[in-house]
Amino acid sequence: PIEVPTAVREAARAARRVTVLTGAGMSAESGVPTFRGAKGGLWEEFDPMTLASQRGWDADPDLVWAWYAWRIGLVRALEPNAGHRALARWANGGGVEVRIATQNVDDLHERAGSEVLAHVHGDLFALRCSVCGAPFEDEPEIPAEPVQRLEPPLCGECGEYVRPGVVWFGGMLPEGAFDAALDACLDADLVLVVGTSGIVYPFASLPDIARGHGVTVVEINPEDTDLSSGVDHVWRATAATALPALVEALEADPA
Ligand code: APR
């Protein structure tokens, strides 16, 4: 495993309540493309305002649904990575409370065995009617290959189009999700910020708020981000190499 920076290892050893804030970089090593940052990001090909906004959906639901149907198929075909698994091991190892608040709409944390406190930007798999809001429990048609357009499923209650349970750009966050993430940052003794560019608010404000309350904040990201200058320690490493190394170091030398 890679070397754990001493300051990070010591902060983690002393921690009893750890809150982990994750973004797309957490799932990158599982094969889920990030939105920005790394080259080849999905959104270089797609205009996010078209794809992930109420206006974009209203204008062209077949285009937006095609992209999310592809992402559902993609995530289902992929596996949690060593970073997801390390967080689950840490939480299940006892002695430390590990709470995860994620911007990710995938279910890879859960499939690795973690409980997720909050999906602040929603849940790809929580399909619901775009008009009456009724949950859609059937299996949507998922194309084997990405298609440019695909008609969304129809709501069993009202016949209108079904949409993914993600938060549209500029849309309302799921009730209570941000507050749960905020509370988990305020009463933590360590916050790890993993794999996020720190661009999208209000989620991006959490590290700064935590730090303002005297909580130690560590960023784990191979690249510099908008958050880097405002954290206590920056660990330039990837999620699937840093988190297993950290958890192994803690298991080898518990506090
Ligand atoms: N390990 C850790 N971090 C990584 C890795 C990796 N293997 N690969 C890339 N990263 C980092 C990138 O350096 C970048 O800082 O992950 C970050 C990904 O940033 P974004 O693509 O902007 O993803 P995120 O910050 O989660 O986006 C926030 O924007 O598009 C909306 O709602 C969407 O939730 C998303 C939000």
Image (tube, grey):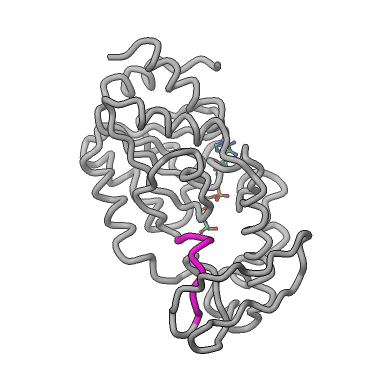
Vertically, is 47 above or below 228? below
Q: Identify which residue is drawn at 64% across, 45% down.
A: 78
Q: Identify which residue is drawn at 32% across, 66% down.
A: 175
Question: What is the x, y in percent for residue 38?
Answer: 65, 43
Q: Is residue 230 left or right of residue 36?
A: left
**Residue occupying the far bottom of the picture:** 158
Question: What is the x, y in percent for residue 12?
Answer: 33, 23
The verdict on residue 103 being magenta is: no
Q: Which quarter of the image is occupied by the C terminus?
A: top left
**Residue occupying the far top of the picture:** 253
Q: Nearer the viewer, residue 116 or 224?
A: 116
Q: Which quarter of the image is occupied by the N terminus?
A: top right
Q: Identify which residue is drawn at 73% across, 60% down.
A: 45
Question: What is the x, y in percent for residue 98?
Answer: 33, 35
Q: Nearer the viewer, residue 7 or 253?
A: 253
Q: Nearer the viewer, residue 36 or 32?
A: 32
Vertically, is 150 above or below 74? below
Question: What is the x, y in percent for residue 54?
Answer: 52, 77
Q: Is residue 237 left or right of residue 171?
A: right
The residue segment tinted magenta is 122-130
Q: Identify which residue is drawn at 76% across, 70% down.
A: 148
Vertically, is 7 above or below 169? above
Q: Main secondary structure of the magenta part?
A: strand
Q: Could you say which quadrant of the image residue 207 lies in?
A: top left
Q: Is residue 91 left or right of residue 153?
A: left
Number of labels in the image equals 0
